[in-house]
Image (cartoon, helix red, strand yellow):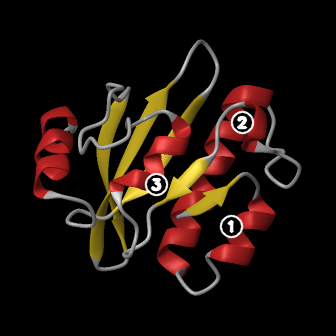
Amino acid sequence: MIVINSLKDVNEYLSESEGLRKEIVNYIRGLAESITGENQVEEFNLEEVGSILVIESDDTVKELEQFGIVIEGEEIPILIPEFVDRVKVGENQIMRIVWVCGDCFGFTVYYAPKTFSEEFDRWLEKHAID
């Protein structure tokens, strides 16, 4: 799993995935503008509002335990997402999941279907925006 908190992280960890890099840069830009009221994407840091988590192909649902999204031994999150939408990245479609934890903190997770279990994917589909 890749944890992203800044534009520097995006450029460092996602340099080989141009489509995903562009998607996340645009997402951070939108967050920066909505939170600060300005386009300060270069200085913007997500640590105070919630990281972006990019699930990699060899990850398991256990990766989400450390963030309190899934409890140990379970396949389904204990938190209901604020929203789940589909994002086209290159030729692929991935899921962008936003979990809000409290008033002003949350996690955005980029997840390719079939990375975790079928049960997890079915659960996500129930919450997806069409």
- What residue is at 72 percent from the left and 51 percent from the top? 5
Q: For residue 51, which numbered disc appears in the image?
A: none
Quadrant location of residue 85?
top left
Q: For residue 63, which numbered disc appears in the image?
A: 3
Q: Looking at the picture, which amino acid does disc 2 mark? A: Glu
Q: Percent from the top left, x then y, of residue 35?
A: 72, 27
Q: Percent from the top left, x then y, of residue 50?
A: 65, 36
The first of marks 1 and 2 along the sequence is: 1
Task: Look at the numbered disc 2 and give the secondary structure of its residue.
Answer: helix
Task: Look at the numbered disc 1 and give the secondary structure of its residue.
Answer: helix
Q: Quadrant of the C terminus?
A: top left
Look at the picture and state if 40 lies above or below 106.
below
Q: 123 or 33: which is nearer to us? A: 123
Q: Looking at the picture, which amino acid does disc 3 mark? A: Glu
Task: Look at the numbered disc 3 and give the secondary structure of its residue.
Answer: helix
Residue at which label 1 appears = 10
Residue at which label 2 appears = 33
Q: Percent from the top left, x then y, of residue 83?
A: 34, 32
Task: Check the image and name the residue furthest to the front.
Answer: 73
| Real-space CA distance between mark 1 and mark 2, rounded to the nearest whole angstrom | 18 Å
Q: Percent from the top left, x then y, of residue 19?
A: 48, 75
- What residue is at 37 percent from the left and 78 percent from the top? 90
Look at the picture and state if 61 lies above or below 115.
above
The first of marks 2 and 3 along the sequence is: 2
Task: Check the image and name the residue furthest to the top.
Answer: 103
- What residue is at 54 percent from the left and 43 percent from the top? 66
The first of marks 3 and 1 along the sequence is: 1
